[in-house]
Amino acid sequence: MESIVSYKLSNPLLIDKISSIVFWHRSADCAESTIFLPNNSCGFGFTLSGDLLLKNKTDFHRMPAFGTRNTLTKASIIKTSGDFLNISVRLTVPNGLSLFTKIPMNIVYEDVATSLNDIFSNQEIADLVDSLLEASTGEEKIMVLEHFLVSKIIVSHPPLFVALINKIHAAKGQCTIAQLAAYFTISERTIHRLFNKLVGVNPKNYINLIRFRTVLQLSSKPNSDLLSNAFEVGYYDQSHFIKNFKNFSTLTPSQFFNNKSIDKVSDFYNL
């Protein structure tokens, strides 16, 4: 049995920074693996019981119980063990974690996961986890997380960075770094610097991710044509589309849709 429940926050200091807090529960007999597709809503989570396992080339290995989830670059195959409960903070696009730490995001997200003990102090995380375990209801756990997050806000995103992100999303990924630099009258180097620090990937990869997510959204509609959707969001030929799709999903578009791999895609980052 599996349940995924998403909660919105009520604290006005967090509403524009945290998109939701997600409670993901799986019973011990729920052993099948699931696919996490790349998504621009990164986050960090707390596994309060059981284990979260990530597949590498040959086997599954345990992810940090309290850590980040890098969902920006490639698909992940995940499964759980034991009576599993994870509470995850889904950060507002593109990466709200940069509002809570001065550590550059390209360092935080250089691997598939980073322990929160490497971002906050060991004592802070220990106290937070103890409070989450002591809270008896979901609402109480959310209040615990809200108090912690409010206490850790240290910066605001620069207006230029916010404008860049909004422009990329408005264009649905149909833009280049050179076009963005010309539009905002800044250097391409400035754009790269902002993305490395505040997102964790270079701007080209982020633009491609938004384009990939847009194709997925369009192709989820009944009777939609996959290749037409690809051309609609700016892929200039079929081979370009296939290469980009495979980079993010590890499968070609036909493999992904025809083999019904989409049925195995987790709802966790697609609510």
Image (spheres, rainbow, N blue to C red):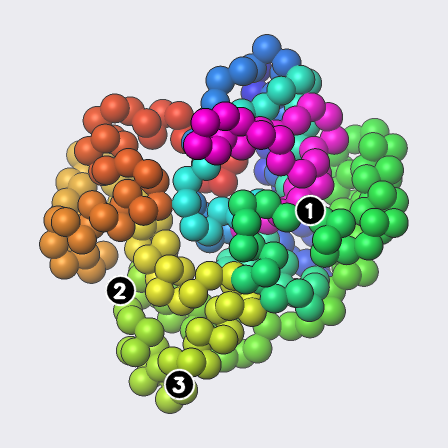
**For residue 270, what is the image quadrant?**
top left
Q: Is residue 183 left or right of residue 154?
A: left
Residue 72 locus on image (x, y percent): 46, 51
Q: Quadrant of the N terminus?
A: top right
Q: Which residue is nearer to you in this view: 49 or 6?
A: 49
Q: Is residue 13 magenta?
A: no
Q: Residue 203: name its quadrant.
A: bottom left
Amino acid identity at mark 3: Ser
Q: Position of residue 166 (x, y in %)?
A: 43, 68
Question: Judging from the image, what secondary structure is the residue with disc 1 in?
Answer: loop
Residue 115: image tag: 1
Badge 2 marks a residue whose secondary structure is loop
Q: Residue at x 41, y 45 (%)?
A: 74
- Mark in the foreground, 3 or 2: 3
Point 33% across, 38% down: residue: 250
Q: Which dot marks residue 187?
A: 3
Q: CA distance from mark 3 to mark 2?
A: 19 Å
Question: How far apart, in angstroms, are the residues tagged by discs 1 and 2?
Answer: 34 Å
**What range is drawn magenta here?**
42-68
| Numbered mark located on residue 174 in the image | 2
- Are the residues at dot 3 and dot 2 in contact (C-beta closer than 8 Å)? no
The mark that comes first in sequence, 1 or 3, is: 1
187 sits left or right of 226 in the view = right
Q: Residue at x 23, y 48 (%)?
A: 243
